[in-house]
Amino acid sequence: MQFPDDDNGKMLAAMAESGIDLSVALDVDFFLIFDDQRDAESALEALAQTDLKGELELNFSEEIEKWELIVCLNMVPAYETLVAKEIELNDFAQEFDGMTDGWGVMQHQEGDDEFADDDHECDDNCSHSH
């Protein structure tokens, strides 16, 4: 699979190299960032009212000192789709003085056992949280 030589292309190439199957739908997190909490909350409410099929999460990122609205969409991570979605979300975020700040995929996807903790099988006597 060939990917364009830009940030999105490099990210997809790295994912493919790490063994992630890019032909199936994955949970992709798009990050929208806002300086102002009210703007972020307004954007969250507006997004919640669209027909967007995805999970929304808002938190304050200490690292960048901005409010981060995470839009988690289950989608096949095709380059064109990701770019189009990022442009769409960036246009949306700009209405609330925000912007997109890239996207990511959690390494651990459903049905993916490769990243389990050291093959530790939990039983009823386990004291750590599941």
Image (cartoon, grey):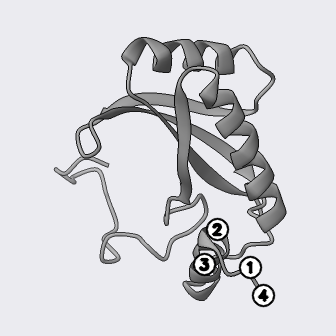
Q: Which amino acid does label 2 sit on?
A: Asn
In the picture, the disc for residue 4 is: 1
Would residue 78 be seen by someone viewing this image from the given angle?
no
Q: Badge 1: few (under 14), some or many (20 or more) residues near its Cα, within 10 Å?
A: few
> Which residue is label 3 attached to?
10
Q: Which amino acid does label 4 sit on?
A: Gln
Q: Which of marks 4 and 3 is nearer the N terminus?
A: 4
- Residue 101 x %, y %: 51, 48
Instruction: Say which of 88 and 77 sits in front.
Output: 88
Tags 1 and 2 touching, CB below 8 Å: yes
Q: In this view, does 80 lie to the left or right of 120?
A: right
Tags 2 and 3 touching, CB below 8 Å: yes
Give the alpha-carbon distance from disc 1 to disc 3, as whole Å. Answer: 7 Å
Q: Which of marks 1 and 3 is nearer the N terminus?
A: 1
Task: Give the SS element for disc 3.
Answer: helix
Q: What residue type is labelled 3?
A: Lys
- In the rendered picture of this protein, how many numbered marks are placed on residues? 4
Task: Give the SS element for disc 4.
Answer: loop
- Residue at horizontal 73%, vertical 45%? 87
> Which residue is label 4 attached to?
2
> Which residue is label 2 attached to?
8
Q: In this view, does 127 lie to the left or right of 92?
A: left
Q: Which of marks 2 and 4 is nearer the N terminus?
A: 4
